[in-house]
Image (cartoon, helix red, strand yellow):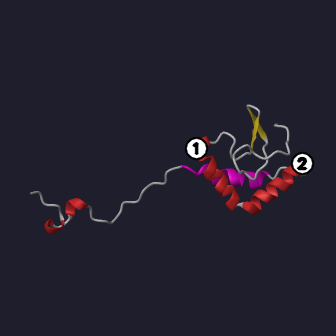
């Protein structure tokens, strides 16, 4: 288990405490092993989940771990950056446009 630290996560503006050491930097459970391109989106979601994050941070400072809360956040964060399937639109495309609405060549 990683040693607890009072430092915040190394991801910019992350409100969580760093608990996993990687190359001299500490990352929270949500940013650890995440795609660095998604750091801002993950941090934004953590700010939206402020009440949960505050409970987790308090527990970590007291030497406890709120496993269910952290797992819930990790599950929520895991979906960030994944493309959702597109639904088939009901819009008629340009190939079905009426003749007088299409461009006419010279």
Q: Secondary structure at mark 1?
A: helix
Q: Which mark is residue 37?
A: 1
Residue 3, x across and y down, in percent: 85, 38
- In the image, 86: left or right of 4? left
Q: Is residue 9 above or below residue 22?
A: below
Q: Quadrant of the N terminus?
A: top right
Q: Which residue is mark 2?
A: 63
Task: State yes or no: residue 79 in magenta.
Answer: yes
Residue 58, x across and y down, in percent: 85, 55
**How busy is the neighbourhood of tag 2: few (under 14 within 10 Å), some, or many (20 plus)?**
few
Give the main secondary structure of the magenta stretch: helix
- In the image, 12: left or right of 105? right
Which residue is found at the position 74% from the left and 61% from the top?
50
Name the outermost residue toward the front. 106
- Which stretch did the figure color magenta? 67-81
Q: Is residue 83 above or below residue 104?
A: above
Q: Can you see residue 35?
A: no
Name the outermost residue toward the left. 106
Q: Nearer the viewer, mark 1 or mark 2?
A: 1
Q: Which mark is residue 18?
A: none
In the image shown, does 87 or 42 lie closer to the viewer?
42
Which residue is found at the position 80% from the left and 54% from the top?
56
Residue 32 sits in which quadrant? top right
Residue 91 sits in which quadrant? bottom left
In the image shown, does 74 or 9 lie closer to the viewer?
9
Q: Is residue 46 above or below residue 32?
A: below
């Amino acid at each position: 288990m990683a040693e607890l630290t009072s430092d915040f996560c190394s991801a910019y503006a992350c409100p969580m405490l760093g608990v996993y050491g990687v190359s001299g930097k500490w990352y929270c459970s949500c940013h650890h092993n995440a795609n660095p391109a998604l750091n801002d989106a993950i941090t934004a979601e953590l700010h939206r989940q402020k009440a949960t994050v505050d409970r987790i941070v308090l527990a970590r400072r007291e030497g406890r771990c709120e496993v269910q809360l952290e797992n819930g956040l990790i599950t929520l964060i895991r979906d960030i950056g994944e493309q959702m399937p597109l639904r088939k639109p009901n819009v008629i495309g340009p190939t079905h446009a009426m003749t007088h609405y299409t461009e006419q060549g010279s």
